Image: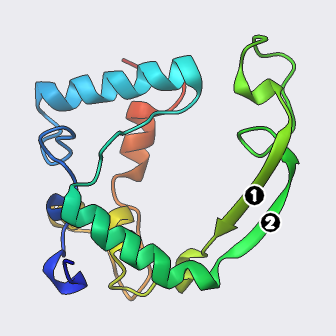
Amino acid sequence: MVSIDAVLDLLDVVDLDRYPLNDPDSVAYADLVERCRAQLAETGASELEDFLNGPGLDLMLADAIELEPQAFRSGGLGTAYLGPPDETLPEDHPRRYWGDYGVGAVAYDLFPPDSPIRRLYVPAFARRRRGRGLRGGAPRAVGRRRALRQCGPGAGG
């Protein structure tokens, strides 16, 4: 197993051949964004299959297992998006159907600063590139707005 200290950067845990997040000016990055947009438009979600490389996945799983006892659990009846059905959507859309759900969520402030999962949300390369990131212990999701603009519903092309 890879230690937390051994993986300090998003570049170390993500399959960058498949997901070139470190090269936002490349054609491959633009293609990735377009695939994400198409999936979002078609299904309401974008799946990044094998996003983490092998050592990265092992590291994230170990982190999740350690944090799991602190998860807040809830369940009930809702859509795949955990909200009420939206009857204005097409008949085959997942937001139209009720189903049982169960969720366990760990609050961000329970993740230690060296948590690999936390580091995935505040990637080191983004902190280096923009000169921002963790300041005074408070997390900043650098690049999140850009990702939402590029991949979110209604994103411009």
Furthest-top residue in this view: 90
Indicate left or right for 15 with 52 as reference: left
Q: Name the residue tied to disc 1.
A: 102
Instruction: Classify the position of the N terminus by image quarter.
Output: bottom left
Choose between 116 and 153: the one closer to the eye: 116
> How far across and how far down the image is residue 133, in percent?
30, 71
Choose between 147 and 79: the one closer to the eye: 79
Image position of 51 with respect to 62: above or below: above
Indicate left or right for 32 with 104 as reference: left
Label 1 element class: strand
Q: Name the residue tied to disc 2.
A: 74
Figure quadrant of residue 103: bottom right
Q: Are marks 1 and 2 in contact (CB under 8 Å)?
A: yes
Indicate left or right for 106 with 138 as reference: right
Label 2 element class: strand
Identify which amino acid the numbered label 2 is placed on.
Ser
Identify which amino acid the numbered label 1 is placed on.
Gly
Looking at the image, tell me whether mark 1 or mark 2 is earlier in sequence order.
2
> How far across and how far down the image is residue 36, in percent?
39, 28
Image position of 9 with respect to 26: above or below: below
> How far across and how far down the image is residue 49, in percent?
35, 39
* Residue at 33 percent of width and 74 percent of height: 116
Image position of 138 with respect to 94: above or below: below
Inter-mark Cα distance, 1 to 2? 6 Å
Indicate left or right for 82 with 76 as reference: left
